[in-house]
Image: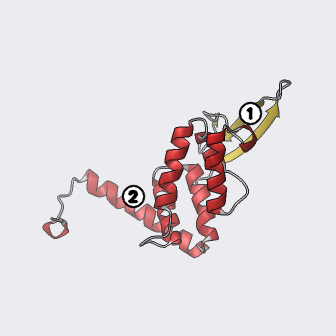
Amino acid sequence: MFLEAAHVNLLRGSNGISKWSRDVHDFQGENTMAAQRLVEYADARPEVRAVYDDIMATRKTDWINHFWNALANDPATLQRTWDSIKQIMAPGALDPLTKEMLYIAVSVSNQCPYCIASHTASARQKGMTDAMFHELMAVVGMANETNRLAAGYQVEIDEQYKTV
């Protein structure tokens, strides 16, 4: 699986300010550092806490994941992204499990280990089985292969597939 192994250390400095480090072993086993500190609820500015509160209420949870903690370094981006994802992932013509599985498929294609992990967990909570995950990975793999073949061969689109 594409998941990264991560180890997070949170240290308190003598002045009480959070210091952090994160050792990540990526796909090749190389160490990388997170680019942004994680903004915990207790350390968050009021506008960030308001978004965190909405995330927890909407998701019916008592914690904020690292994705949102990282985005909180830029409150405007945090707010905009949360507003968008809340709207897009809300019930609609596609059921919530289908939306999560689509998110996994795109995350695999974009090679985003964090999104793969978080949306796989969410899809499993919504009922995705191992068999569904395996079939999804087969479809993602086949789509990526045939997309690259069609692009490489520069295949002309059939008239029957063109939309007006």
Type of amino acid under label 1? Trp
Bin the neighbour count of mark 1 within 10 Å (Cα to Cα): few under 14, some 14-19, many 20 and up.
some
User: Are circles 2 and 1 on residues that touch, CB within 8 Å?
Assistant: no
In the rendered image, residue 54, in percent from the top left (x then y), is placed at 62, 54
In the rendered image, residue 26, in percent from the top left (x then y), is placed at 61, 42
Q: Of discs 2 and 1, which sits in the foreground?
A: 1
- Residue in the picture at 71% in, 42% down: 40
User: In screen coordinates, is 69 left or right of 134?
Assistant: right
- Residue in the picture at 49% in, 46% down: 80
Q: On screen, 9 above or below 93?
A: above
Residue marked by disc 2: 144
Bin the neighbour count of mark 2 within 10 Å (Cα to Cα): few under 14, some 14-19, many 20 and up.
few
The residues bearing labels 2 and 1 have C-alpha atoms spaced at a distance of 37 Å
Residue 117 visible in the displayed image: yes
Pick out the residue farthest to the top.
15
Quadrant of res 6 = top right
Q: Which is nearer the eye, 153 or 102?
A: 102
Type of amino acid under label 2? Asn
Q: Which is nearer the eye, 45 or 147?
A: 45
* Callout 2 secondary element: helix
In the rendered image, residue 112, in percent from the top left (x then y), is placed at 53, 49
Q: On screen, 55 above or below 97?
A: above
Residue marked by disc 1: 20
Tell me the quadrant of the picture where the N terminus can be found. bottom right
* Callout 1 secondary element: strand
Q: Which is nearer the eye, 101 or 141?
A: 101
